[in-house]
Image: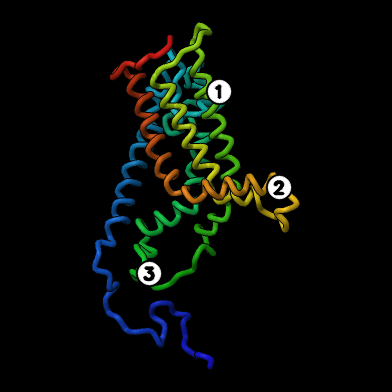
Amino acid sequence: MSSTTDTSGGVTASGRATIAARTLRTDRWWLPPLATFVAFVAWVAYATVRAFMQDFYFVPEYGYLTPFYSPCVSVGCAPEASHFGQFLPDVWWLPYAAVSLPFLLLFRLTCYYYRKAYYRAFWLSPPACAVAEPHARYTGETRFPLILQNAHRYFFYIAAIITLINTYDAVLAFVKPDGGFGLGLGNIVLVANVVLLFGYTLSCHSCRSVVGGRLNHFSKHPLRYRLWTQVSKLNTRHNQFAWATLASLAITDFYVMAVSAGWITDLRIVG
């Protein structure tokens, strides 16, 4: 028996129960999107201030470089922090890490998890499960600017390179200016941040597609199948890595800033 019920209108389609209330949920469904909204706004505000502060980003005594300023390629960067040269002009409106920041932002903005998070928290599309959204029409990600979400895979490649650069910075920080080995709390913070960044990058849906995509028979590609299996396991934790890296980036930057500004002294373990 076929049905002729029109479902093209979604929650307002003919044949559906007419419910005036936006939702029948009685729990505090609005709390998660509100918490996400507050957390995102607070992080973006902090990151924006720090990106344009252009100070307290490097500790020359220990080689600590905040990931917010890596790679530091402005002519205003400290020479010891410019591991990849200096070629951008030193003007107040251009952050020292202007080469990497736009791509990192685009990588996270187009991330599958972050889309869900800010679609709900900022656009209320929808704000929660079983809660009708206030928008009259839904066009998906077929028009500008949301059609740019399809470029996520390309931003993934650039973000992976930047993660490798952050790793290089963290490893280089173990070498003291006089050439000896040094280990302090700052080194541990930098390495922990890099480990979480790798977790976030490797657990990305695009990484999973790159590793195991375009294969018709996994049995003929045992190495790629094994890698795909491991990335798939990481992928189940992608949302945790997304939040953990936001926290680790802010903590790492704040620690480097605090040591650089002289607010605290780095706890030295060796050297």
Q: For label 3, count other residues whose C-alpha is less than 10 Å away and answer few (under 14), some (14-19) or many (20+).
A: few
- In depth, the one of 205 and 217 nearer the eye is 217
| Residue where numbered disc 2 is placed | 222
Does residue 93 show up? yes
Of mark 2 and mark 1, the one earlier in the sequence is 1
- SS label for mark 1: loop
Residue 123: give its label. none
Position of residue 7 measured from the top left corner of the image (x, y, whole percent): 46, 82
Amino acid type assigned to the residue bearing label 2 in the image: Pro
Position of residue 22 measured from the top left corner of the image (x, y, whole percent): 29, 73
Position of residue 24 measured from the top left corner of the image (x, y, whole percent): 27, 73
Residue 86: give its label. 1
- In depth, the one of 35 and 2 nearer the eye is 2
Q: For label 1, count other residues whose C-alpha is less than 10 Å away and answer few (under 14), some (14-19) or many (20+).
A: some
Amino acid type assigned to the residue bearing label 1 in the image: Gln
What residue is drawn where x is 43% and y is 39%? 245
Where is residue 251, by image quadrant? Answer: top left
Quadrant including the C terminus: top left
- In depth, the one of 75 and 149 nearer the eye is 149
Where is residue 244, by image quadrant? Answer: top left
- SS label for mark 2: helix
Of tags 1 and 3, the one toward the viewer is 3
Amino acid type assigned to the residue bearing label 3 in the image: His
